Image: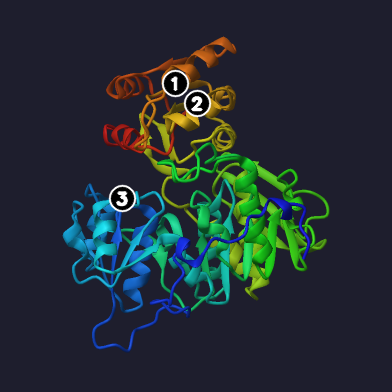
């Protein structure tokens, strides 16, 4: 197979580097029980994270003994404990005693005391991505990859498959209401298959996973700027290195479904024997046409190779959500699901947590929270807010010093079309400060570009007080960022009379 990016693709690392070993988790449909009298014990470091908590649920459903630890308790750790998973609210080398497999992400330092203790005790240390690699090896599987839209697209694929009568298993980097009970959602779903998973490109080893169908949403330069072996384990040293990894991942899949609307994305799949596309452009295998946006969402028609499949609607605004839904309907079609019930399921879809999540109202103003944290995502979220017809008021929290250093001019540009912008301090995400990099770079650039209502709020409580006193029924207040800005949205809703 040829590929225009082939020269950029590195050789795979030794098995030890990607955690490949005789698997304790055998690829198979979910759920699966073990035949051993005492099932293997998996311990997950950072179990309160959105990704590892999903793995914990999947492993427990398969009959394994599961425990974990995290530095701080959270809603997720509380939910896991309610489900019978033991969670320690601190890190301690003693946690590895009696453990068969220790799971950790690549962001955990190799010198962490728990990892060192596991190695000294000859306990297998398995990277998170190695575990996902094993799960994806169970065919049929669907891996969703790209810089933007993975969580929403993965959620929509699972929901559409469910609506069409299939029984997907799923692993998602967000809380999906349809996966849980009436009172709480989940980031994992147990089913007989196919298995659909969000594949995180911030982990360099994602490129060595193999799935049946790769859904490729887009490719940009996020998570770029770190050096191999540095503390910035979730960064790539260059965009070329990251894009080569995308090319490797999709090149190894049995089938690729890529977004034709994203510029040059087709170059990643040149020479692949089984390529399909989705988008709004003529020539897309699956195409959204007669797109009709309104204040609460978008209706559109779906065609396959020019033949009409039917009408669809998504109650989430923004063109990006039309594309996400189109990908979900395309995957459902590829796996034999009926279009109409799949479309009906998407029309009722509420969205995963922190992806255009309706939080409540304040003096009639709609409060929405969104995970948007880089320029492309922020621009899409602002465009979605404008679609509502309300006055758009954005509270933006920059994420990471390095990301802000790389992209603050683009972030300012992406916020220009909001009617009002409140900028909070940078969410460090454990990164050390960088001299000269501050949230005011964005607010000052906005003002320099002519924005009349851009302000920096060093004290979050002052932003809350201001919004409480100025909210209007015609407003939409959108909190944006990958940090803890979501708390502000809930403070506003909680303060509503």
Find the distance from the CA under tag 1 to the CA under tag 2: 6 Å
x then y, percent, for residue 215: 63, 59
* Residue ID for mark 1: 437
Find the distance from the CA under tag 1 to the CA under tag 3: 29 Å
Q: Nearer the viewer, mark 1 or mark 3?
A: 3
Relative vertical location of residue 289 with respect to residue 164 in this rendering, above or below: above
Tags 2 and 3 in contact by the CB under 8 Å rule? no
x then y, percent, for residue 291: 71, 47
* Residue ID for mark 3: 111
* Residue ID for mark 2: 405
x then y, percent, for residue 47: 30, 57
**Going from the N terminus, do you reach mark 2 or mark 3 first?**
3
**Going from the N terminus, do you reach mark 1 or mark 2 first?**
2
Name the element at disc 2. Answer: helix
**117 sits left or right of 22 in the view:** left
**Going from the N terminus, do you reach mark 1 or mark 3 first?**
3
Find the distance from the CA under tag 2 to the CA under tag 3: 28 Å
Asked whether the viewer can see residue 236, the reply is yes
């Amino acid at each position: 197979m040829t590929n225009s990016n082939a020269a950029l693709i590195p050789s795979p690392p030794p098995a030890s580097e990607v955690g490949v070993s005789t698997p304790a988790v055998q690829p198979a449909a979910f759920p699966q029980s073990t035949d051993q009298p005492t099932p293997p014990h998996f311990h997950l470091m950072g179990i309160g994270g959105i990704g590892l908590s999903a793995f914990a649920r999947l492993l427990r459903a398969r009959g394994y003994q599961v425990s974990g630890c995290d530095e701080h308790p959270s809603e997720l750790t509380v939910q896991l404990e309610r489900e019978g998973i033991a969670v320690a609210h601190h890190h301690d080398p003693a946690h590895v005693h009696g453990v068969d497999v220790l799971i950790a992400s690549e962001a955990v330092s190799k010198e962490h005391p728990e990892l060192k203790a596991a190695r000294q005790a000859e306990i297998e240390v398995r990277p998170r991505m190695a575990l996902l690699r094993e799960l994806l090896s169970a065919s049929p599987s669907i891996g969703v990859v790209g810089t933007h839209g993975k969580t929403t697209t993965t959620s929509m694929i699972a929901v559409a498959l469910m609506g069409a009568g299939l029984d997907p298993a799923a692993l998602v980097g967000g809380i999906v209401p349809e996966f849980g009970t009436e009172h709480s959602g989940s980031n994992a779903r147990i089913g007989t298959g196919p298995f659909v998973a969000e594949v995180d490109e911030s982990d360099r080893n994602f490129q060595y996973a193999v799935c049946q169908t790769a859904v490729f949403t887009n490719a940009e330069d996020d998570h770029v700027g770190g050096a191999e072996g540095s503390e910035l384990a979730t960064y790539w040293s260059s965009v070329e290195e990251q894009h080569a990894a995308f090319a490797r991942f999709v090149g190894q899949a049995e089938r690729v479904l890529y977004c034709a609307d994203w510029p040059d994305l087709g170059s990643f799949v040149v020479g692949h024997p089984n390529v399909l596309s989705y988008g709004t452009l003529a020539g897309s295998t699956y195409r959204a046409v007669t797109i009709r946006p309104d204040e609460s969402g978008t209706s559109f028609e779906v065609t396959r190779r020019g033949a009409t499949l039917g009408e669809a609607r998504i109650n989430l605004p923004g063109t990006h959500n039309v594309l996400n839904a189109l990908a979900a309907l395309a995957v459902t079609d590829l796996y034999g699901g009926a279009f109409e019930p799949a479309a009906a399921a998407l029309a009722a879809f509420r969205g995963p947590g922190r992806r255009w999540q309706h939080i409540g109202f304040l003096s009639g103003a709609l409060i929405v929270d969104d995970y948007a944290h880089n320029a492309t995502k922020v621009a899409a979220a602002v465009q979605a807010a404008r679609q509502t017809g309300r006055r758009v008021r954005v509270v933006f929290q920059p994420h990471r010093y390095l990301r802000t250093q790389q992209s603050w001019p683009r972030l300012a540009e992406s916020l220009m079309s909001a009617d009002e912008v409140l900028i909070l301090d940078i969410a460090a995400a454990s990164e050390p400060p960088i001299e000269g990099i501050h949230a005011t770079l964005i607010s000052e650039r906005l003002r320099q570009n002519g924005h009349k209502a851009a302000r920096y709020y060093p004290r979050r409580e002052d932003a809350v007080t201001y919004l409480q006193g100025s909210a209007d029924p015609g407003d939409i207040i959108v909190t944006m960022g990958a940090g803890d800005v979501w708390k502000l949205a809930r403070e506003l809703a909680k303060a509503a009379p």
